[in-house]
Image (tube, helix red, strand yellow):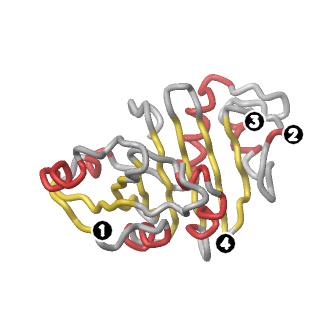
Amino acid sequence: MYGADLPLVSVTFARDLTARQLLERMRADPSTLAERTQEEFREDFGDILYKDGAYVVTAGRYESWAWVWEHDSWLCVGDDDLLGVVSAGTAAVALHANEKPMVDFRYAENGRLVTGLDTLLGIQPEHRTGQDPHRFDAELRALGARPDTGETGPLGLRGLFYRLAEGLGAGMDRTDLLAGTVLSARLQPHPDRAV
């Protein structure tokens, strides 16, 4: 993902799950869950793809990690409880980046948020969240950042967060996004936590 031109990203990864299992954990509407050709995807979702509340997603797998790309939402970044459900019995990463620039990295294991980092608060120790907010300090330093002072180094926060995810083995193959068929659905947000 690092080095790719991905201006808007809202992706959730889960280790050792299939894409379908990840979608089920993220509350995909079963009536919308299907393999679709690119043409069928455009027919079914093209008119709502980027509308608020549509919650359109595509899903795939990269090595041992399943991924779900939220085209118009950021449910897993905005809901630590949902990320907990996704990570039950495994590990999960939620990445969000937009043009504001807002960048979030959230890592969870076995139903609990381990580390949360974002651009609003920075990477300084006092602004992190999770049960082990310093879990990635060594990796941040190796990437040129200084987490104790908040300096992000040459990669910036977006680059750091992409590299952290890649270091865990999570990623996406660009060809999967353009594949002939794609697993896709609409998510059902928790009524109290729609983002």
Q: In the rendered view, does 101 fall on the left or right side of 181? A: right
Choose top left, top right, bottom left or bottom right for residue 147: top right
Upstream in sequence: badge 2 or badge 1: 1
Gap between marks 4 and 2, in whole Å? 24 Å
Identify the residue at image location x=61%, y=50%. 78
Q: Which residue is mark 3?
A: 123
- Which amino acid is tagged 4? Asn
Q: Which residue is mark 4?
A: 110
Q: Are marks 2 and 1 in contact (CB under 8 Å)?
A: no
- Which amino acid is tagged 3? Ile
Identify the residue at image location x=54%, y=48%. 195
Identify the residue at image location x=30%, y=68%. 33
With respect to residue 87, does 134 lie above or below? above
Gap between marks 3 and 1, in whole Å? 37 Å
Q: Provide the secondary structure element on which disc 2 rests.
A: helix
Q: Are marks 4 and 1 in contact (CB under 8 Å)?
A: no
Q: Which residue is mark 2?
A: 126
Choose top left, top right, bottom left or bottom right for residue 36: bottom left
- Which amino acid is tagged 1? Leu
Identify the residue at image location x=15%, y=51%. 43
Q: Are marks 2 and 3 in contact (CB under 8 Å)?
A: no
Q: Which residue is mark 1?
A: 33
Q: Categorize mark 3 by other alpha carbons within 10 Å: few (<14), some (14-19), many (20+).
A: many
With respect to residue 191, does 116 lie above or below? above
